[in-house]
């Protein structure tokens, strides 16, 4: 079985830097160290990259959520409560 080399390829905001082994449990799905457009490193499995399930380190989602805070008061209240819970557990 030939191993795909995804080094240098872009998937959404992620650019693959190097292979980081395989998923635990002896799976054949390779793990890749990726650099996000925001500069963060993130390790992602081949199938998640190729299927488009992972396109950033999470910053893309956080940015989208932050932009929604002003659009929906109800949703914003929910996020403020979640932030308060997170601060309390930190």
Image (cartoon, rainbow, N blue to C red):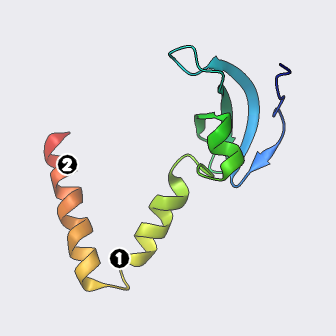
* Horizontal and vertical percent position of residue 25: 50, 15
Q: Is residue 90 left or right of residue 37?
A: left
Dot 2 falls on a residue whose secondary structure is helix
Circle 1: element type: loop
Q: Position of residue 67 (x, y in %)?
A: 45, 75
How far from the left and from the top, in percent, is residue 6? 81, 34
Report how many numbered discs are placed on residues in the image: 2
Figure quadrant of residue 80:
bottom left
Q: Who is closer to the viewer here, 41 or 7? A: 7
Q: Is residue 42 above or below residue 60?
A: above
Question: Quadrant of the image for the N terminus?
Answer: top right
Report, in whole angstroms, how far the alpha carbon at label 2 lies from the one at label 1.
18 Å
Compared with 78, 36 (above or below) is above
Residue for point 57% across, 22% down: 23
Q: Quadrant of the C terminus?
A: top left
| Neighbours of disc 2 within 10 Å: few (<14), some (14-19), many (20+) | few
Q: Kindly identify which residue carries mark 2.
A: 87
User: In the image, what residue occupies the spot 72% across and 23% down?
Assistant: 19
Q: Of the two numbered discs 2 and 1 on the same chain, state the one appearing first in sequence.
A: 1
Residue designated by label 1: 69
Which class describes the residues within 10 Å of circle 1: few (<14), some (14-19), or many (20+)?
Answer: some
Q: Is residue 46 above or below residue 23?
A: below
Image marks 2 and 1: residues in contact by CB distance under 8 Å = no
User: Going 66% across and 21% down the picture, which residue do you hit?
Assistant: 28
Residue ID at (35%, 76%): 69
Q: Is residue 35 left or right of residue 86?
A: right
């Amino acid at each position: 079985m030939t191993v795909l080399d995804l080094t240098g390829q872009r998937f959404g905001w992620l650019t693959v830097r190097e292979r980081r082994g395989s998923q635990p449990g002896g799976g054949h799905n390779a793990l890749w160290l990726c650099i996000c457009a925001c500069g963060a490193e993130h390790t992602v499995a081949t199938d998640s990259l190729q299927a488009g399930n992972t396109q950033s380190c999470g910053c893309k989602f956080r940015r989208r959520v932050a932009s929604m805070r002003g659009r929906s008061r109800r949703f914003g209240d929910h996020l403020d409560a979640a932030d308060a819970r997170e601060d309390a557990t930190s």
